[in-house]
Image (tube, rainbow, N blue to C red):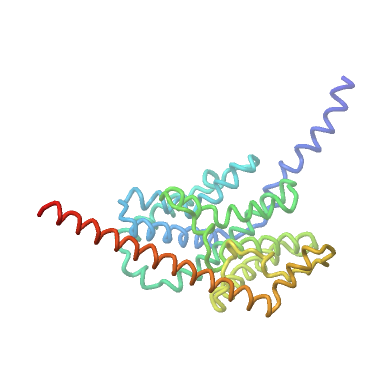
Amino acid sequence: MDVIAVAEPMLARLVSPVSGAMEAQVAVPFWLELVAIVVASISGALTAREHKLDLVGAVALAVLCSLGGGLLRDVTLQVGSVYLLEQPLALPAAIITATVVYIIPSFIEQQDRLIAVLDIFAVGLYSATGADKALVYGFNPMICVMMGFFTGVGGGMLRDVFLGKVPNIFQRSNLYALAAIAGGCVYMALVELDVSHVAAVVACVAVTMGTRWLSLHFNIMSPTDEDIARMMPRRKRPTENSSARREIAGRSPDALAERRERTLANIEERREQERRSEALSRIKRIRRKRDQRRIDV
């Protein structure tokens, strides 16, 4: 009985954050979530048409784009409920959107700018909600930002993986994944400062969209294989031995001129040897032809 009495408070402390997690999670209006799902589904369906996939492929890519990031987050966290299973309208919305876009794509393709704006809006919203879900379950801020990143761009990453190509977020381009990370960091910083979660979500979306817009406006690209060490000035080491001093002396203008003269002399000497060898070979050929004529006669 004493063991049970001691264990009950400990279990209560372990379970209490999880039991109240859903109540503490930031409340995002469903119509905003629906907008994000529809926009991401449109992107997946249009990508399927570009790659000549059938209707099943379009629906699959739409579901991956719109709900794959949240599924990746929930599978990684392994706490709480899975959004794809919890929200009954999420999957039908993705399927219906993909079907309509696949059958009637002309009108959607004309709204490319609007789709691009809503797409980065969805990335910012997903980043905030993904980070918030990890936060309410007691994970540290770095894990929360990573979960926001997974939720925001994980769907597009899974889409590219299913298409058999390197994900776009891993290639040199205007800031997209970094914009999601920036938004997640802003959200976590504001929450740690006891700012309202709703205000933090708005700030996360604004920073994500602003970062993306700045990268497009000023053509800021994500870094690739640049070697920063080559840009740093190198300090000259003091020469203490005679060999180093001779090497530096050999780099003087007089020494370079002398070295150039020697090189030209060597080149001229090799050319002269080649001319002599060619003349000797020509004489030998003439003699062989003469001897052959005598034999014939």
Q: In the rendering, at what x and y percent does residue 228 appear? A: 67, 65
Report the front residue among 200 and 43. 43
Report the front residue among 257 and 24. 257
Farthest residue in the top direction? Answer: 1
Q: Considering only vertical position in the picture, is 206 above or below 152? A: below
Quarter assignment of residue 186: bottom right
Q: Considering only vertical position in the picture, is 135 above or below 32? A: above
Q: Considering only vertical position in the picture, is 290 above or below 246? A: above
Q: Is residue 283 left or right of residue 209?
A: left
Q: Total label count? A: 0
Q: In the rendering, at what x and y percent does residue 242 appear? A: 81, 64
Q: Is residue 137 left or right of residue 91?
A: right
Q: In the rendering, at what x and y percent does residue 221 appear? A: 56, 69
Quarter assignment of residue 11: top right
Q: Considering only vertical position in the picture, is 193 above or below 157? A: below
Farthest residue in the left direction? Answer: 297
Report the front residue among 276 and 217. 276
Q: Is residue 278 left or right of residue 66?
A: left
Report the front residue among 217 and 2. 217
Residue shown at 65% from the left, 68% from the top? 202
Q: In the rendering, at what x and y percent does residue 246 appear? A: 76, 68
Residue shown at 38% from the left, 55% from the top? 96
Q: Quadrant of the C terminus?
A: bottom left
Residue shown at 46% from the left, 62% from the top? 39
Q: Quadrant of the N terminus?
A: top right
